[in-house]
Amino acid sequence: MYAEQQHDDVTRSVLSVLVEDVDGIITRVTAMFTRRGFNLVSLVSAKTETPGIARLTVVVDASEHAIEQITKQLNKLVQVLKVLRLDEESTIARSMLLVKVNANNSNRPQVVDAANIFRARVVDVAPDSVVIEATGTTSKLYAFLDVLEPFGIREYVQSGRVALSRGAKTLSPGK
């Protein structure tokens, strides 16, 4: 029920973009996508180990040709230092999910058991609901939502992906 949908010629790609951490950089990056009609699935901005440098993790559904165009356009932005397309085999990627589920005295143990199976944790308990935090791959989080659905999901929010390459390879400048 919560699975991701994609078109035939479109693939989901993850771009890791190192940028100067300056005012307006996210606006410039998102404007580039908007002007060219590319659809952002998610965008996460975070500080890096290098002061003044931020990492944008961009998830986009686009054709191979469009990904090449996106990469070229990103590299034209002065504040962009590096752009790397991450491939699934050599990347660790995770998202976070907060989900509020109906839970009363009779079904709360089953809801907590479901959370434990998915290595999630209960972060808030109310008389008629619980809020659960889970991290993992998108498919794991959607599977978790499917398990919780029979209890009644009141609301949920899911972050965009954060991702790093496996092994010694790094995107950081000078390393």
Image (cartoon, rainbow, N blue to C red):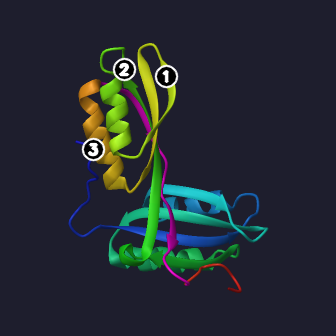
Please indicate whether residue 24 sits to the left or right of residue 8 in the image.
right
Check the image and report above or below for 168 versus 156: below
Is 159 magenta? The answer is yes
User: What's the amino acid at mark 1?
Assistant: Val
Question: In the picture, which quadrant includes the C terminus?
Answer: bottom right
- Residue at the image position 76 percent from the left and 63 percent from the top: 22
The disc, 2 or 3, on the residue closer to the chain's N-terminal end is 3
> What residue range appears in magenta?
152-168
C-alpha distance separating marks 2 and 3: 21 Å
Q: Position of residue 108 (x, y in %)?
A: 35, 22
Residue 160 x %, y %: 48, 53
- Mark in front: 2 vs 3: 2
Q: Position of residue 164 (x, y in %)?
A: 52, 70
- Kind of residue indicated by mark 2: Ala
Q: Nearer the viewer, residue 40 or 93?
A: 93
Dot 3 corresponds to which residue?
2
The answer to whether residue 17 is visible is yes
Mark earlier in primary sequence (1, 2): 2
Q: Which residue is mark 1?
A: 125
Quote the CA–CA distance across marks 1 and 2: 9 Å
